[in-house]
Image (cartoon, grey):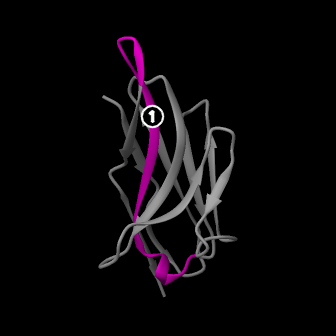
Amino acid sequence: QVQLVESGGGLVQAGGSLRLSCRASGQFFSVNELGWYRQAPGKQRELVATITPRMVTNYADSTKGRFTISRDNAKNTVYLQKNNLKPEDTAVYYCKGAIQVMRIDIIDELHLWGQGTQVTVSS
């Protein structure tokens, strides 16, 4: 079973830093775009950042300059380094990945979500 496994959330004071990790596990052909999204209480899930296998990145305006997305293709892992955290960054952070799997003689692409990890920033 292919899945995305996240780690690294927690409680941090405003101005602090955290690094989230998300690893694709199971049997698959390749990992395409990976990204991070977040959902604050009472709000819709929103984009934080995405990264392609060739390291092309895209950021939401609210996180540019403070958050950095990166990936290790050999480990099938994506990271989100978050600096200068603010209370409004408090949310459940979700990893999302486009994972290619073999289906007998064709390649299928799955769009998977991780289980989510809570990040709480205290003021």
Amino acid type shown at disc 1: Ile
Quadrant location, the N terminus: top left
The percent position of residue 118, horizontal first and vertical second, equals: 37, 65
Residue 122 figure quarter: bottom left
Q: Is residue 51 above or below residue 41?
A: above
Magenta-colored span: 85-107
The percent position of residue 83, horizontal first and vertical second, equals: 63, 70
Q: Determine if the magenta segment contains residue 97.
A: yes
Q: In the image, what residue occupies the spot 60% across and 80% down?
A: 15
The percent position of residue 8, horizontal first and vertical second, equals: 47, 56
Given residues 100 and 116, the one toward you in this image is 100
Mark 1 — residue?
A: 99
Q: Determine if the magenta segment contains residue 117.
A: no
Q: Is residue 26 above or below residue 45?
A: above
Given residues 118 and 49, the one toward you in this image is 49
Which secondary structure is most common in the magenta stretch? strand
Considering the numbered disc 1 on the image, is that residue within a helix, a strand or a loop?
strand
Lateral position of residue 62 relative to residue 118, left or right: right
Lateral position of residue 113 relative to residue 51, left or right: left
Residue farthest top in this picture = 105
